[in-house]
Amino acid sequence: MDYYSIGLQLYFNRRLRQIRYDALQHLDRDKIALGRVMRMLRRHLPLTPLLSRPFMVRILSLSAAAAALAFAPASGANDQAETVSDTGEVTPVKLVEFNGGWEVLKTSSQLRVWRSHLGYTIAVDAEGKPTECEIEQEFRRAYVNKKLCSVLMKTHTFEPARDATDAPVPGSFTNQLSYLELREEN
């Protein structure tokens, strides 16, 4: 193998990584369609030197990921409340106020969070105060999870869950925030 073909192969591998990164950034931010991603790949990547099986597998996996993101149902804020109680009927935790849309956007931008949604569960004590927070799809770096949870716990106000005798009991609140909707509101 000569130096020219090695250099060409390194160039195309580097270019493919950059294009895949750009395509995933576009998909996450703008939710563009699969056809646009494929056109971008065809325009920026000459396919003649690298029509090998691993290259085709990469392209197919990218298109499958793009299709999954494009056709996934975009659910807004699905407010679901759960409570932990062994006695009969329980009134779930009620969200009184969420005033942290701008704070969540700012913190996510500072931490370079590039997701379309943020799912989380907040544990609420019997007084209605948040005690714990858990991100559904955790980030690799623990400080990102901790920082987002601290912002979420600070900006939510709850009414505690109540059991059958109308006594306050601990519970949990599950929600999913859409960054697109937060940007439109703020």
Image: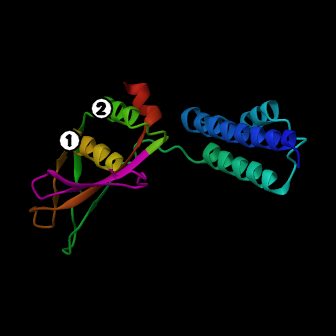
Where's residue 68, x and y in %? 64, 50
Residue drawn 77% across the image and 40% down it: 12
> Which residue occupies the foreground of this view, 6 or 179?
6
At label 2, which amino acid type do we have? Glu
| Residue 128 drawn in magenta | yes
- Amino acid at dot 1: Lys
Q: In the orientation shown, which residue stands out farthest toward the right?
A: 48
Q: Position of residue 130 (x, y in %)?
A: 18, 51
- Residue at the outermost bottom position: 86
What coloring was used for the rendering?
Answer: rainbow
- For image coordinates 66% across by 37% down, the residue present is 18
Q: Would residue 96 be found to the left or right of residue 17 on screen?
A: left
- Residue 103 — which label? 2
Question: Where is residue 101 shown, x and y percent of the image?
Answer: 32, 33
Q: Which residues are magenta?
A: 118-142
| 131, above or below 99, in the image | below
Vertical order, 32 against 122 (above or below)? above
Q: Is residue 52 magenta?
A: no
Inspect this view and state whether residue 76 appears.
yes
- x and y, in percent, of residue 156 in the image: 22, 42
In the image: residue 38, left or right of residue 87: right
Q: As drawn, is 165 to the left or to the right of 30?
A: left
Circles 1 and 2 in contact, beta carbons < 8 Å: yes
Q: Nearer the viewer, residue 139 or 105?
A: 139
* Precedes in sequence: disc 1 or disc 2: 2
Marks 1 and 2 sit apart, C-alpha to C-alpha, by 10 Å
Q: Which image quarter: residue 84? A: bottom left
